[in-house]
Amino acid sequence: MKYLCLVYVEEALLDALSNDASAALAAESIAYHEELASRGQLAVAHALQRVRHARVVQLRQGGRMTRTGGPFVETREPLGGFILIEADDLNAAIQIASKVPLARVGSIEVRPIARVDRMEVSAA
């Protein structure tokens, strides 16, 4: 089963890292992605550009589109990237996510991928 690991990072913490610490974190992240790929557990992983480059598109009543800058969700840590993994179950996906190096300076949200033909829609 596929799980999406959303990587939330406080950009100020990344900016505060020394060049050496930043390079070490990047190298460790790449090594972990390569390890997951070698085990057949990595589908894709990408970092996102800084939140200042983000735009939010929303469709509201009457189909009117609005576009704003900044992150979509109100969080202290904007979305910084994602890793799409393969895991047997949610517990295995959580174990994989717990080893993502950026979890030390951010948060990793683990979410199962829904198949559109089986997606359930419920009223909140």
Image: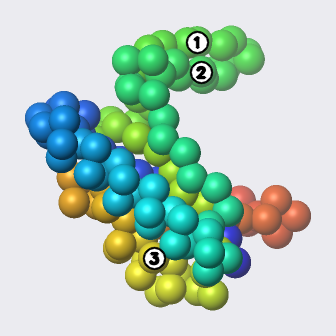
Residue displayed at 68% across by 12% down: 64
Q: Quadrant of residue 96?
A: bottom left
Q: Which residue is mark 3?
A: 96
Specify the amino acid type for callout 3: Ile
| Mark found first going from the N terminus, 1 or 3 | 1
Three-letter amino acid code at disc 2? Val
Q: Residue 120: horizontal and vertical position, in percent? A: 73, 65
Judge whether residue 109 can be spotted in this image: no
The vertical placement of 105 against 109, above or below, is above
Residue at (82%, 69%) from the top-left corner?
A: 118
Most foreground residue, 21 or 123: 21
The C terminus lies in which quarter of the figure?
bottom right
Is residue 42 among what the camera can see? Answer: yes
Separation (CA) of disc 1 from disc 3: 37 Å
Disc 1: CA contacts within 10 A as few (<14), some (14-19) or many (>=20): few
Disc on the earlier residue, 3 or 2? 2
